[in-house]
Image (spheres, grey):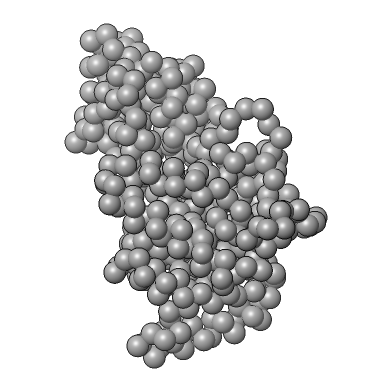
């Protein structure tokens, strides 16, 4: 990415170094599964949107539910592209990466996600690991990254987190949020508000610890990576901005449409829609039913519709296959029903962590007998919201 850089002016008495003003940046946070990288990135993206930036986020999901730790193919995380304009895609190579170990960047490098000049903020605890093989792998990674032209900043992030909590692995993500907040001059009050919202059900103690980790990461960055300081001005826009993925937009569309009940069985990659509705649907009087299987979910939705409620079921390709007979029943009996299909990649049970548009023909023709349906194929996140309302 080519960026026209210029110096932004800040007050002379400011404690911040003078940031480099840029039009946009691409940030990645990569880790092993379960280290909270995605949560940190989602929170950072939301703060960027509330500060007026255009934002696009993409989750990095490994093929396995729980891949072995420190493996090149097991990277879990998120990419955030934000800028001073409307952002429509995830971009090309990352500008800055936070890596929780030395192995997960390799998989992203193989996918050409990084370029010479990409900054990598690397957890340095592996240099002193008690296992000799891990120390050797870490040293080799540093050599490899240097040959590739990557700029590595070794940082004792986990060790620093121990000043706040005894198990830094579960809190390092909010520390990283503080780190990025300094680097990109984010508003800490907005970060604190996001954290309070995320952890509101876990109580004030958990919220307080995460606030401390945020502040600690901010101060840590000020001391250790003060030369990395950027400012991405807000996008000149007169409308408030939010960060939403397709599944959240579906949930918002369900609520905005006045849909009275949703029945679904958890299935990747549709599950986060039910998670969102589980948190918010009750606030508008909606009823969310988690069924014991896909067939029961569509049966519940059809029964609800027959009883006079507006009903929806959300699934993915394998679930759509299981619902086929019931879809024919709804058509035959002329019972209104909305089905959302969040598509996986590949045939049969598919690839849960990869997506494609392979279910369109199954949606259109996948039924016994003459059972016509209206198919609305969303091409954008905005359409995920509007199409549910239209349906």
Task: Left or right? Give the position of 244 relative to 211.
Answer: right
Q: Is residue 6 above or below residue 154?
A: above
**For the view shown, which residue lies furthest in the bottom direction?**
132
Q: Is residue 26 above or below residue 301?
A: below
Among the 4 quarters of the image, the one containing residue 159: bottom left
Give the position of the C terminus as an image quadrant. Answer: top left
Q: Is residue 309 above or below residue 385?
A: above
The percent coordinates of residue 352 (x first, y second) are 39, 49
The answer, for residue 231, to whether it is visible in the render is yes
Give the position of the N terminus as an image quadrant. Answer: bottom right
Among the 4 quarters of the image, the one containing residue 84: top right
Q: In this view of the protein, which residue sits in the foreground, 316 or 27?
A: 27
Q: In this view of the protein, which residue sits in the foreground, 31 or 223?
A: 223
The percent coordinates of residue 87 (x first, y second) are 65, 41
Name which residue lies at 21% across and 32% down.
291
Name which residue lies at 70% across and 70% down.
116
Q: How many marks?
A: 0
Name which residue lies at 57% across and 33% down.
241
């Amino acid at each position: 990415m080519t960026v026209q850089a210029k110096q932004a002016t800040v007050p002379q008495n400011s404690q911040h170094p003078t940031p480099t003003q840029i039009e946009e940046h691409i940030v990645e946070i990569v880790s092993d599964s379960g280290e909270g990288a995605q949560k940190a990135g989602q929170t950072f993206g939301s703060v960027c949107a509330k500060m007026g930036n255009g934002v696009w986020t993409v989750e990095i999901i490994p093929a396995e539910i729980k891949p072995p730790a420190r493996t090149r193919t097991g990277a879990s995380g998120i990419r955030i592209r934000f800028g001073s304009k409307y952002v429509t895609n995830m971009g090309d190579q990352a500008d800055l990466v936070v890596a929780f170990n030395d192995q997960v960047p390799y998989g992203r490098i193989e996918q050409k996600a990084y370029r010479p000049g990409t900054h990598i903020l690397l957890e340095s605890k592996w240099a002193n690991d008690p296992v000799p093989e891990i120390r050797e792998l870490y040293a080799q990674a540093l050599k490899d990254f240097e040959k590739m032209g990557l700029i590595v900043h070794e940082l004792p992030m986990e060790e620093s987190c121990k000043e706040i909590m005894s198990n830094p692995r579960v809190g390092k993500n909010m520390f990283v949020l503080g780190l990025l907040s300094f680097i990109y001059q984010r508003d800490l009050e907005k970060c604190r508000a996001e954290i309070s919202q995320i952890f509101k059900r876990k109580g004030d103690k958990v919220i307080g610890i995460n606030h401390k980790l945020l502040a600690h990461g901010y101060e840590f960055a000020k001391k250790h990576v003060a030369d990395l300081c950027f400012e991405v001005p807000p996008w000149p826009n007169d409308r408030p901005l939010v960060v939403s993925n397709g599944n959240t937009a579906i949930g918002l569309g369900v609520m905005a449409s006045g849909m009275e009940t949703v029945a679904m069985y958890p299935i990747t990659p549709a599950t986060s829609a039910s998670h969102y509705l589980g948190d918010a649907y009750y606030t508008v009087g909606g009823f969310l039913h988690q069924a014991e299987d896909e067939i029961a979910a569509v049966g519940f939705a059809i029964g609800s519709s027959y009883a006079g409620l507006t009903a929806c079921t959300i699934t993915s390709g394998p679930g759509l296959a299981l619902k086929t007979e019931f879809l024919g029943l709804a058509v035959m009996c002329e019972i209104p029903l909305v089905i959302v299909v969040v598509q996986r990649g590949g045939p049969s049970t598919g690839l849960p962590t990869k997506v494609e548009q392979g279910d369109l023909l199954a949606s259109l023709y996948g039924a016994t007998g003459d059972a016509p349906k209206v198919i609305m194929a969303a091409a954008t996140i905005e359409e995920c919201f509007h199409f549910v309302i239209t349906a």
